[in-house]
Amino acid sequence: MFEGVTMVDEIVTCVMLLITGIAILVMIHVWIVERAFREQNGVGSGIALQRRTVSIDVIKKLPCFDYKGEVNEESQSNLDCAVCLEIFKEGDKCRLLPNCNHIFHCQCIDSWLSKTASCPICRRTLEISVCSVCEAGAQMA
Ligand SMILES: [Zn+2]
Ligand SMILES: [Zn+2]
Protein backbone atom coordinates (compact mmCIF):
# COMPACT_ATOMS: atom_id res chain seq x y z
CA MET A 1 0.00 0.00 0.00
CA PHE A 2 2.76 2.41 1.01
CA GLU A 3 4.73 1.54 -2.07
CA GLY A 4 1.66 2.20 -4.22
CA VAL A 5 1.22 5.70 -2.74
CA THR A 6 4.88 6.47 -3.44
CA MET A 7 4.45 5.39 -7.04
CA VAL A 8 1.40 7.61 -7.49
CA ASP A 9 3.33 10.42 -5.86
CA GLU A 10 6.22 9.87 -8.23
CA ILE A 11 3.91 9.74 -11.24
CA VAL A 12 2.22 12.99 -10.14
CA THR A 13 5.63 14.61 -9.65
CA CYS A 14 6.74 13.39 -13.08
CA VAL A 15 3.58 14.67 -14.74
CA MET A 16 3.93 18.03 -12.98
CA LEU A 17 7.56 18.29 -14.11
CA LEU A 18 6.54 17.33 -17.65
CA ILE A 19 3.76 19.93 -17.71
CA THR A 20 6.10 22.58 -16.29
CA GLY A 21 8.71 21.66 -18.89
CA ILE A 22 6.19 21.85 -21.73
CA ALA A 23 4.88 25.18 -20.40
CA ILE A 24 8.42 26.60 -20.32
CA LEU A 25 9.09 25.30 -23.85
CA VAL A 26 5.84 26.84 -25.11
CA MET A 27 6.71 30.16 -23.48
CA ILE A 28 10.20 30.13 -25.02
CA HIS A 29 8.69 29.20 -28.39
CA VAL A 30 6.13 32.02 -28.21
CA TRP A 31 8.86 34.46 -27.18
CA ILE A 32 11.14 33.40 -30.06
CA VAL A 33 8.32 33.51 -32.61
CA GLU A 34 7.18 36.91 -31.39
CA ARG A 35 10.72 38.25 -31.50
CA ALA A 36 11.31 36.81 -35.00
CA PHE A 37 8.01 38.29 -36.15
CA ARG A 38 8.96 41.71 -34.82
CA GLU A 39 12.41 41.50 -36.42
CA GLN A 40 10.89 40.34 -39.71
CA ASN A 41 8.50 43.28 -39.62
CA GLY A 42 11.39 45.64 -38.99
CA VAL A 43 13.47 44.16 -41.81
CA GLY A 44 10.43 44.11 -44.10
CA SER A 45 9.77 47.81 -43.71
CA GLY A 46 13.50 48.44 -44.19
CA ILE A 47 13.44 46.61 -47.52
CA ALA A 48 10.32 48.47 -48.57
CA LEU A 49 12.12 51.73 -47.92
CA GLN A 50 15.27 50.61 -49.71
CA ARG A 51 13.49 49.20 -52.76
CA ARG A 52 14.63 51.38 -55.61
CA THR A 53 11.89 52.76 -57.72
CA VAL A 54 11.44 56.11 -59.35
CA SER A 55 8.56 58.30 -58.37
CA ILE A 56 6.30 59.76 -61.05
CA ASP A 57 7.57 63.24 -60.19
CA VAL A 58 11.16 62.19 -60.92
CA ILE A 59 10.19 60.37 -64.14
CA LYS A 60 8.43 63.48 -65.40
CA LYS A 61 11.66 65.43 -64.91
CA LEU A 62 13.59 63.19 -67.33
CA PRO A 63 14.36 64.74 -70.71
CA CYS A 64 11.52 64.13 -73.14
CA PHE A 65 11.57 64.79 -76.88
CA ASP A 66 9.82 63.93 -80.13
CA TYR A 67 11.66 61.35 -82.19
CA LYS A 68 12.68 62.93 -85.48
CA GLY A 69 13.99 59.92 -87.36
CA GLU A 70 17.55 60.76 -86.50
CA VAL A 71 19.55 59.89 -83.41
CA ASN A 72 22.81 61.30 -82.22
CA GLU A 73 25.99 59.30 -82.88
CA GLU A 74 26.43 57.63 -79.48
CA SER A 75 22.95 56.12 -79.43
CA GLN A 76 22.72 55.24 -83.12
CA SER A 77 22.50 51.51 -82.43
CA ASN A 78 19.51 52.16 -80.23
CA LEU A 79 16.82 52.53 -82.89
CA ASP A 80 14.16 50.45 -81.21
CA CYS A 81 12.60 50.68 -77.81
CA ALA A 82 13.94 47.90 -75.59
CA VAL A 83 10.72 47.82 -73.57
CA CYS A 84 8.14 47.27 -76.35
CA LEU A 85 10.70 46.25 -79.04
CA GLU A 86 9.08 48.61 -81.56
CA ILE A 87 11.19 50.71 -83.87
CA PHE A 88 10.99 54.42 -83.15
CA LYS A 89 8.83 56.31 -85.59
CA GLU A 90 8.98 59.98 -86.35
CA GLY A 91 6.96 61.95 -83.83
CA ASP A 92 7.15 59.27 -81.11
CA LYS A 93 7.40 60.74 -77.66
CA CYS A 94 10.74 59.53 -76.33
CA ARG A 95 12.74 59.83 -73.18
CA LEU A 96 16.51 59.84 -72.83
CA LEU A 97 18.05 58.33 -69.72
CA PRO A 98 20.65 60.81 -68.48
CA ASN A 99 23.13 58.22 -67.19
CA CYS A 100 23.58 56.09 -70.31
CA ASN A 101 21.88 58.02 -73.16
CA HIS A 102 19.55 55.12 -73.94
CA ILE A 103 16.26 56.11 -75.55
CA PHE A 104 12.79 54.65 -74.91
CA HIS A 105 9.20 55.59 -75.55
CA CYS A 106 7.86 57.87 -72.85
CA GLN A 107 5.04 55.55 -71.80
CA CYS A 108 7.32 52.48 -71.95
CA ILE A 109 10.11 53.83 -69.77
CA ASP A 110 7.65 55.53 -67.43
CA SER A 111 5.95 52.27 -66.54
CA TRP A 112 9.33 50.48 -66.43
CA LEU A 113 10.86 53.00 -64.05
CA SER A 114 7.87 52.89 -61.76
CA LYS A 115 8.83 49.23 -61.11
CA THR A 116 12.62 49.23 -61.51
CA ALA A 117 15.00 52.14 -61.15
CA SER A 118 17.46 50.91 -63.76
CA CYS A 119 17.94 51.08 -67.50
CA PRO A 120 16.24 48.15 -69.35
CA ILE A 121 19.23 47.89 -71.72
CA CYS A 122 22.36 48.35 -69.64
CA ARG A 123 20.84 47.82 -66.17
CA ARG A 124 22.60 50.90 -64.92
CA THR A 125 20.87 52.28 -61.89
CA LEU A 126 19.10 55.46 -62.66
CA GLU A 127 20.59 58.15 -60.49
CA ILE A 128 18.80 61.41 -60.59
CA SER A 129 19.85 64.01 -58.11
CA VAL A 130 16.59 65.26 -56.71
CA CYS A 131 16.50 67.50 -53.73
CA SER A 132 14.48 65.61 -51.15
CA VAL A 133 13.18 68.91 -49.76
CA CYS A 134 12.09 70.19 -53.18
CA GLU A 135 10.53 66.85 -54.11
CA ALA A 136 8.57 66.88 -50.88
CA GLY A 137 7.53 70.44 -51.61
CA ALA A 138 6.41 69.50 -55.12
CA GLN A 139 4.29 66.63 -53.75
CA MET A 140 2.71 68.96 -51.23
CA ALA A 141 1.74 71.50 -53.88
ZN1 LIG B 1 8.38 51.40 -76.36
ZN1 LIG C 1 21.13 52.28 -70.45
Image (cartoon, rainbow, N blue to C red):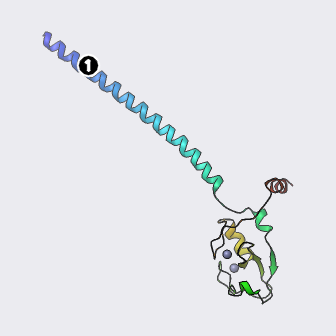
Q: Secondary structure at mark 1?
A: helix
Quadrant location, the C terminus: bottom right
Q: Residue furthest front?
A: 74
Where residue 27 appears, as percent x and y from the top left, is 43, 30
Q: Quadrant of residue 113?
A: bottom right
Where residue 95 appears, as percent x and y from the top left, is 76, 76
- Image side of residue 20 versus residue 48, left or right: left
Height in image: 15 above or below 86? above
Where residue 18 appears, as percent x and y from the top left, is 30, 26
Question: Image quadrant of ligand 2?
Answer: bottom right
Residue at image x 63%, y 75%? 122
Height in image: 91 above or below 126? below
Residue at image x 67%, y 85%? 86
Q: How many marks?
A: 1
- Image side of residue 109 versus residue 68, left or right: left
Q: Nearer the viewer, residue 55 or 128?
A: 128
Q: Residue furthest top?
A: 2
Q: Quadrant of residue 56?
A: bottom right
Q: Quadrant of residue 68?
A: bottom right
Residue at image x 57%, y 45%? 41
Residue at image x 75%, y 65%? 128
Query: Would you name the residue on which mark 1 appears?
Result: 12
Give the residue type that dot 1 points to: Val
Height in image: 23 above or below 110? above
